[in-house]
Amino acid sequence: MKQFFKWFAVAFPVVCLLLAGAVCLASSHGQKVHVRGYLIDNSCWNERDGKDVHSLLREHTKDCLQMPDCTKSGYSIVTDAGSVYPLDADSNTKVVAWIDATQKDADWQVDVKGRWLDGKLAIKKIELQRAPKH
């Protein structure tokens, strides 16, 4: 029995450290998220000055998304409920290329999967929302 307690006294702290390390490692990759909302550049979003938010989101154009100041400001996803998910630097770069390759002009409703970490969204996948079938 003494042997068991000696073994336990050594093994228990090691197991606790391993579990704590696993938790830290998992949290360092962020929480998985699936967000549906509107893609908008941070410059236009921050300068909305009392404009009707839903109109701004629906009418926001590809030309504006591609303007140098807008591109430089980065992008966010804004949900219908008003939650804002700013993109991380790597995702902003990916989105610039994605916008260039997309034929959409306005109403940038997107479906995004990624990870939420340190107040930024790291995009793994972004696509235009499909229109509902009637």
Image (cartoon, rainbow, N blue to C red):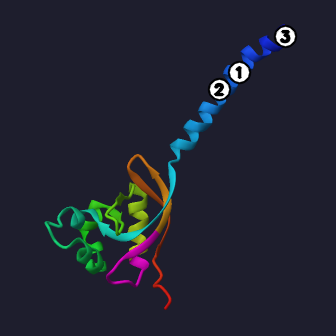
Dots 1 and 2: beta carbons under 8 Å? yes
Q: Amino acid at mark 2?
A: Cys
Q: CA distance from mark 1 to mark 2?
A: 6 Å
- Quadrant hosting residue 83: bottom left
Q: Is residue 67 magenta?
A: no
- Residue type at tag 3: Gln
Left or right of 83 on screen, residue 64: left
Which region of the structure is painted magenta? 100-111
Question: Based on the displayed image, in which of its 4 quarters is residue 53 positioned?
Answer: bottom left
- Residue 35 image point, x, y percent: 45, 65
Name the residue: 51% across, 42% down. Answer: 28
Given residues 99 and 131, the one toward you in this image is 131
Please give left or right for residue 24 compared with residue 16 in the image. Answer: left
According to the image, label 2 marks what residue?
16
Secondary structure at badge 2 equals helix
Q: Residue at x 42, y 71 (%)?
A: 97
Mark 1 lies on a secondary structure that is helix
The one nearer the camera, 18 or 92, is 18
Q: Which mark is residue 3?
A: 3
Where does label 1 land, which residue?
A: 12
Query: How far apart are the alpha carbons under marks 1 and 3?
Result: 14 Å
Q: Is residue 69 visible?
A: no
